[in-house]
Amino acid sequence: MADETRIDPEGAHHLFKVVGSVADDIEDALTRVRNIRASLDEPWGTDEYGRKFAQQREPNAEQTLGYVATVRDGIRELAREGHGAVDALVDQDKDNSANLS
Protein backbone atom coordinates (compact mmCIF):
# COMPACT_ATOMS: atom_id res chain seq x y z
CA MET A 1 0.00 0.00 0.00
CA ALA A 2 1.34 3.42 -0.95
CA ASP A 3 1.92 6.14 1.57
CA GLU A 4 -0.74 8.80 1.61
CA THR A 5 0.15 12.42 1.02
CA ARG A 6 -2.32 15.16 1.79
CA ILE A 7 -2.06 18.83 1.04
CA ASP A 8 -4.37 21.80 1.32
CA PRO A 9 -3.80 23.35 -2.12
CA GLU A 10 -5.69 26.53 -1.30
CA GLY A 11 -3.80 26.98 1.95
CA ALA A 12 -0.46 26.18 0.32
CA HIS A 13 -1.11 28.68 -2.47
CA HIS A 14 -1.97 31.28 0.15
CA LEU A 15 1.27 30.52 1.98
CA PHE A 16 3.34 30.95 -1.18
CA LYS A 17 1.45 34.15 -2.02
CA VAL A 18 2.48 35.53 1.38
CA VAL A 19 6.06 34.40 0.76
CA GLY A 20 5.98 36.25 -2.57
CA SER A 21 4.69 39.38 -0.84
CA VAL A 22 7.73 39.26 1.46
CA ALA A 23 9.90 39.53 -1.66
CA ASP A 24 7.79 42.50 -2.77
CA ASP A 25 8.30 44.15 0.62
CA ILE A 26 12.06 43.61 0.35
CA GLU A 27 11.98 45.12 -3.15
CA ASP A 28 10.13 48.18 -1.84
CA ALA A 29 12.62 48.63 1.00
CA LEU A 30 15.57 48.18 -1.33
CA THR A 31 14.17 50.80 -3.69
CA ARG A 32 13.64 53.25 -0.83
CA VAL A 33 17.20 52.76 0.42
CA ARG A 34 18.63 53.20 -3.08
CA ASN A 35 16.55 56.33 -3.64
CA ILE A 36 17.72 57.82 -0.36
CA ARG A 37 21.33 57.01 -1.19
CA ALA A 38 20.96 58.55 -4.65
CA SER A 39 19.56 61.75 -3.17
CA LEU A 40 22.63 62.31 -0.97
CA ASP A 41 25.62 63.77 -2.75
CA GLU A 42 28.17 63.00 -0.07
CA PRO A 43 26.45 61.12 2.73
CA TRP A 44 29.66 60.60 4.67
CA GLY A 45 30.70 64.25 4.55
CA THR A 46 33.23 66.26 2.58
CA ASP A 47 36.00 66.45 5.15
CA GLU A 48 39.00 64.13 5.10
CA TYR A 49 37.54 61.81 7.73
CA GLY A 50 34.26 61.51 5.83
CA ARG A 51 36.02 60.76 2.54
CA LYS A 52 38.19 58.08 4.16
CA PHE A 53 35.16 56.56 5.83
CA ALA A 54 33.31 56.49 2.48
CA GLN A 55 36.28 54.85 0.76
CA GLN A 56 36.26 52.12 3.38
CA ARG A 57 32.52 51.64 3.80
CA GLU A 58 30.86 52.47 0.50
CA PRO A 59 31.92 49.24 -1.25
CA ASN A 60 30.51 47.25 1.67
CA ALA A 61 27.25 49.18 1.54
CA GLU A 62 26.85 48.45 -2.18
CA GLN A 63 27.74 44.80 -1.64
CA THR A 64 25.16 44.53 1.14
CA LEU A 65 22.46 45.95 -1.12
CA GLY A 66 23.44 43.34 -3.68
CA TYR A 67 23.08 40.61 -1.07
CA VAL A 68 19.63 41.91 -0.18
CA ALA A 69 18.66 41.77 -3.86
CA THR A 70 19.90 38.17 -4.01
CA VAL A 71 17.76 37.26 -1.00
CA ARG A 72 14.77 38.96 -2.64
CA ASP A 73 15.31 36.91 -5.80
CA GLY A 74 15.62 33.69 -3.80
CA ILE A 75 12.38 34.35 -1.96
CA ARG A 76 10.60 35.09 -5.24
CA GLU A 77 11.93 31.84 -6.68
CA LEU A 78 10.77 29.95 -3.59
CA ALA A 79 7.25 31.35 -4.02
CA ARG A 80 7.21 30.52 -7.73
CA GLU A 81 8.52 26.99 -7.18
CA GLY A 82 6.10 26.46 -4.31
CA HIS A 83 3.10 27.39 -6.44
CA GLY A 84 4.39 25.10 -9.17
CA ALA A 85 4.88 22.18 -6.79
CA VAL A 86 1.36 22.54 -5.41
CA ASP A 87 -0.10 22.66 -8.93
CA ALA A 88 1.94 19.62 -9.99
CA LEU A 89 0.77 17.63 -7.00
CA VAL A 90 -2.88 18.54 -7.64
CA ASP A 91 -2.52 17.64 -11.33
CA GLN A 92 -0.87 14.33 -10.47
CA ASP A 93 -3.66 13.56 -8.03
CA LYS A 94 -6.28 14.28 -10.72
CA ASP A 95 -4.43 12.05 -13.20
CA ASN A 96 -4.14 9.24 -10.65
CA SER A 97 -7.79 9.42 -9.69
CA ALA A 98 -8.85 9.40 -13.36
CA ASN A 99 -6.96 6.12 -13.83
CA LEU A 100 -8.84 4.46 -10.99
CA SER A 101 -12.10 4.37 -12.96
Image (cartoon, helix red, strand yellow):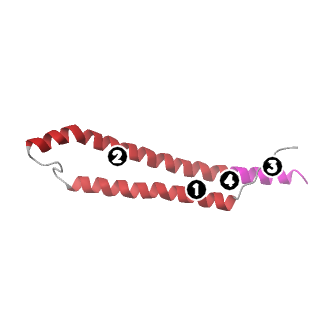
The stretch in magenta equals: 88-101
Give the mark, 4 or 3, whose residue is nearer the N terminus.
3
Labels 1 & 4 near each other (Cβ < 8 A): no
Q: Residues within 10 Å of mark 1 (few under 14, many from 20)?
A: many
Residue at which label 3 appears: 4
Residue 47 image point, x, y percent: 8, 45
Labels 2 & 4 near each other (Cβ < 8 A): no
Whether 34 is drawn above or below 54: the answer is below
Residue 16 numbered tag: 1
Q: Amino acid at mark 4?
A: Asp
**Residue placed furthest toward the front:** 49
Q: Residues within 10 Å of mark 2 (few under 14, many from 20)?
A: some
Give the mark, 1 or 4, whose residue is nearer the N terminus.
1
Residue at 80% across / 49% down in the picture? 4
Assess whether residue 59 is covered by the magenta stretch. Answer: no
Residue 2 image point, x, y percent: 84, 44
Residue 65 numbered tag: 2
Give the mark, 3 or 1, whose residue is nearer the N terminus.
3
Residue at 45% across / 49% down in the picture? 72
**Residue placed furthest toward the right:** 101
- Give the left or right position of residue 42, taking residue 34 as reference: left
Of tags 2 and 4, which is closer to the observer? 2
Q: Amino acid at mark 1?
A: Phe
